[in-house]
Image (spheres, grey):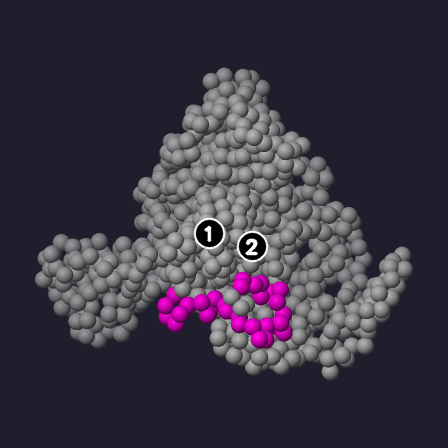
Amino acid sequence: MKQEYNFSRRFFLKTSSALGALAFIPKGVKAFYEEVKNFIVPKKEQLPLTVSINKKSYAIKADTRTTLLDLLREDLNLTGAKKGCDHGQCGACTVHIDGERALSCLTLAAMVPGKEVTTIEGLANGDKLHPMQEAFIECDGFQCGYCTPGQIMSAVACVKEGHTKSVAEIKEFMSGNLCRCGAYNGIVESIQKVAAK
Amino acid sequence: MGFFDEPFDLMTPPEGRVEGVAKVTGSGKYAAEYKVNGLCHAVLVGSTIAAGTILNINTSNAKQVAGVLGVITHLEKPVVPGMADEEKIKEARFGLPVFHTDKVYFKGQPIALVIAETLEDATYAASLVSAEYREDAKTVDFNGTLGFVSLTPAGKDRGDITALNSAAHSIEAEYNIKAEVHNPMEMHATIAEWTADDKLKLFDKNQGVNNVQRTFAKLFNIPVNHIEVISEFVGGGFGSGLRVWPHALACIMAAKLVKRPVKLMLTRPQMFYSVGYRPASWQKIKLGANADGKFIGIHHQAKNGTSVYENFNEGITRVTRLIYNFDNLKAEAATVPLNLSTPTWMRGPGDCTGDFAIESAIDELSYKLNIDPVALRMKNLALEKNPETGLPWSTNYINECIEKGAQMISWKDRKAAHSQNIEGDWNIGYGMAVGAWNAGRGNASAGIQMQKDGSITVQTAMTDIGTGTGISMQNIAHETTGISKSKIKIELGNSNLPPAPSQGGSNGLSSIGGAVVAAVNALKLKLAEHAALQNEAYKNVAAADILLSDKGISLKTANSQFFISYASLWEKNKLGILEVEASSGPGAERQKYAFCSSAAHFCKVRVNRKTGKVKIERLVTVSDGGKIISEKAAANQMSGAAVGGIGMALMEEQATDERLGTLVGNDFAGYHFPVNADAPIIEVAFINKPDPNINPQGSKGLGEVGIIGTAAAIANAIYNATGKRLRDLPITPDKVLLG
């Protein structure tokens, strides 16, 4: 099942050079490119996966093209991880994989079996908020709240990594999480508060 | 003293926003996050050319993909009555008649929509749609095109601008600002579900649910109340959610076609050409003063980009008429059609752009006059009345903003001449600028539901895009009822709730605050009506004389024996949930007074002489927003706006490629706005004096003034540091080095 596609690296290189050779007749290139694309773009394939998210095990069938982010949001109704760019440029989808911060939009679902994924939904201890969540409320570390779960997941890791020695250091190590509302004052203050504990 | 007079805040939980827990735990649901049975996914296909006609579209490959449920194009689509013919399209004023034309006006314009079982299926199938076009001439080059359009008067002339010819000192200069894109962190998304042939339910990202409701009621020719719009959590807007955009219509059409609920979330690249942007602009200012610094007049000319299918005028010269006394004033404007999508309002629309030019010119003039920029502004501020209408300001503390800001940043440390403050490779400089915004208010409604235990739910259709509408409503309800915050629930962002205006133009709190006060008064009167059956003293009392608490009702003027607990009131009158609704809006005060919010921005920069890097070391923002209802949320608004101002000043630029007619760098790698490390800790202060006339709570809107003037303060600081007068935004390191 897995090796159903019978194209090879050699085929790909050949078609690439053919594309180059045909560059002077745009229409031909286009038609040819369409054919090549139709042939080499992987079709839908479902994989049985067992993933552990927030210490809960899920036995699922996932599209091989599905990112961890889309698995969480579309299939498991865990919408705390946000889609802000889907390109690893904004940090809104930050989760922890085996305790390290990771971008779930750049992680395929098929990559996480055997690993422990923690999302914002798994950060609180039952009804008791994580100190970082409390700090974000107290310091008003958000406005619209869309980047907030990613900020908090990064903030927790930032403290754990020990990157909280100065405002400048916190700012540097939180710069992978964009906030268009510009709530950076409160985000930094929240992290300082938790780091001081 | 009765027990109901006891302090109420013993039980108050730690201070925070009403929706705080939902936001920090990820449980708050944004538009694309609702679980809807039978949901399928739609993905838009954009045109690959910038201008022309679609000759044919090949959707057959896409349709063969497993999981695909349907494809919409201008050739095959469900009926939208409001777009049935050319006439109706014009009448609808919807903007781009998506899927109702074979014309292409900009690159990326939706030409097809693929609906499939999963997002992956739809995304893949969308990649297989192709089209053939006949291409027309196009342009996306604002600066190359602006010479072809002529200026026309923007408002009435004041005095005679030829007076400038006799000015002792004058400045004449041009200013260019690149297009900026809102880019709220949540990409616009809609889930559309037809619950009956003529009933529509939408989970949608927007800044005004009633506006969405009205728009689609008209397009689909169904009653307004047949459309339910739910926008409880909105991941930022900055103006992009003030219009209803083509993708939302596309999603509704898709739901009609496949007879299932459909979700459509724009991709980040699509966000750059689907939901508006601040258009590129050109300005020319001629400003003159007499020898002691009194302004003689100003000639302000401005042009902004627009699309070829709609005209969007930014109103860049509006702010010219607002802040200073110019006895002689002439303003002219024009729009420049380009093969780009239609721009729209973005935070501080028009004013933010115009203010950059004016405040830069004033700073430049101050060096010529050898007068401190603070003193020069103080000399010319229109503090008594609106210079345009002649109406006296209800309140205007812009002078106090300036004084406080100067003190906070220690303005006296600024060197009067440029390039005098040097540390190694770094030049240090100080700059300042002011901004103002016409403070508005709209008609809004709010409802209150009260339970037997004295807890209340305050409701409105207004959204909370992150500005703190919810906590501000809670604060106002708490202050006017005396009921503990922990017993006040807020419900908003749903068209089933009492109607409210869209949340934009700094009108949100100004409008809804009055409605909450009105609803509280209605609640008091209703409770008194019931109480009168138990105690005659409550007959015909005025709302102002009625006191509420967590426990019950009493009268201000009477002693505590008139206290009636909610419990007994509810039992005696056999009450269920007590409901009231009230509206409030502007009135005769608008004929008597002029209203404005204002701010002063002060900046200390470091500019590296070798790399051209500009580092904002300090940024101080002091604003007059009347009474501050929620200090933390308001300060957050202002510091966030300042961060936006840093973006406008130093990095935000929607680049275009004229040859391909396309946007360049339409993602977060190609379009930069400030990350955490790009901004210092922003220093925020308020004058915090209530405006007695604007609304019952005395607050003036803040969202816009936070960014109006920031960019000029930064540019002026760069001049003070380096002697380089940079009039084109964004001021990237190359401009600093070559300037």
Q: Which residue is mark 2?
A: A176
The crowd level at tag 1 (other Cα within 10 Å; few <14, some 14-19, many 20+) is: many
Residue drawn at x 39%, y 51% is B633
Residue B230 pos. (x, y %): 47, 67
**Which portion, as a residue range, is magenta?**
A100-129
Residue drawn at x 60%, y 38% is B613
Query: Which mark sits nearer the N-terminus, 1 or 2?
Result: 1
Q: Nearer the viewer, residue A111 or B366?
A: A111
Residue B623 included in the magenta stretch of the image: no
Instruction: Mark 1 vs mark 2: give the one in front.
Output: 1
Q: Nearer the viewer, residue B700 or B188?
A: B188
The crowd level at tag 2 (other Cα within 10 Å; few <14, some 14-19, many 20+) is: many
In the picture, measured across the screen, residue B699 lies left or right of residue A185, that is left
Residue drawn at x 58%, y 28% is B722
Query: What chain does badge 2 belong to?
Result: A
Q: Amino acid at mark 1?
A: Thr
Residue A101 included in the magenta stretch of the image: yes
Q: Is residue B141 above or below residue A104?
A: above
Q: Amino acid at mark 2?
A: Gly
Q: Image quadrant of residue B451?
A: bottom left
